[in-house]
Amino acid sequence: MKIGQYWEPFDFDEIAAGKSFADLVSVALAVLKKMPQPVSLVSGPVTSGGKGSVEENMKVFEHAIHVLEKKGETVFSQLPFEPKFSELAKNWKQEYCTPILDDFYLPILKSGLIKKVWFIPGWEGSIGSKWEYDLCGKLGIERILIKEEMLDPKASSKNVKKAKN
């Protein structure tokens, strides 16, 4: 993953110092503004659905980002935020931590800096991914469904399906 290409050391310090999901948006937007367009984002299960654990789901995210970058996509990785997301979510008392969506992903997706969102297989079982899918449709952001075969090392670009916007 090429995280270091667009990230500065102080970005990681700001993430660590963040006290809320909203605090993290400025870091994400600063990184996104450095990235050549069009910028993609990967969406899929993290805490709900997927492979059954956050650790396994993060491996799938990392692999999907790597595959897309090898295909020439410019991908914004939210992986540097995940430890802070987990820390902040521990204080949330409801079933799903909606501030991650409303206070972090909503401003990022509304910024106009994300042009495509790639959905990992199993995204339909994720509360956050379903929310992102619907929001992308409303905002006119291209939605692309990744087929399981695309994540196979021998995959081809034929294993991608555009969603109807």
Image: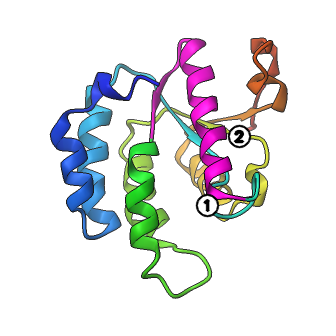
Residue that badge 1 annotates: 128
Q: Which mark is residue 53?
A: none
Residue that badge 2 annotates: 120
User: Residue 20 at what x, y percent from top left?
Assistant: 30, 69
Furthest-front residue in view?
55
Residue 33 appears left or right of 125: left
Badge 1, how many Cα within 10 Å: few under 14, some, many 20+? many
Is residue 67 found inside the magenta-colored segment of the image? yes
CB atoms at circles 2 and 1 under 8 Å apart? Answer: no
Furthest-left residue in view?
10
Label 2 amino acid? Ile
Q: Earlier in the sequence, mark 2 or mark 1?
A: 2
User: Residue 19 at what x, y percent from top left?
Assistant: 25, 70
Tell me where the magenta segment starts and ends, as one range. 53-77
Taking 163 as reference, is 35 above or below it?
A: above
Q: Main secondary structure of the magenta part?
A: helix
Quadrant (top left, top right, bottom left, bottom right) of the C terminus = top right
Furthest-bottom residue in view?
93
User: Residue 9 at what x, y percent from top left?
Assistant: 19, 36
Q: Nearer the viewer, residue 149 or 111?
A: 149
Q: How many marks?
A: 2
Badge 2, how many Cα within 10 Å: few under 14, some, many 20+? many
Label 1 amino acid? Gly
Q: Residue at x 23, y 39 (%)?
A: 30
Q: Which secondary structure, mark 1?
A: helix
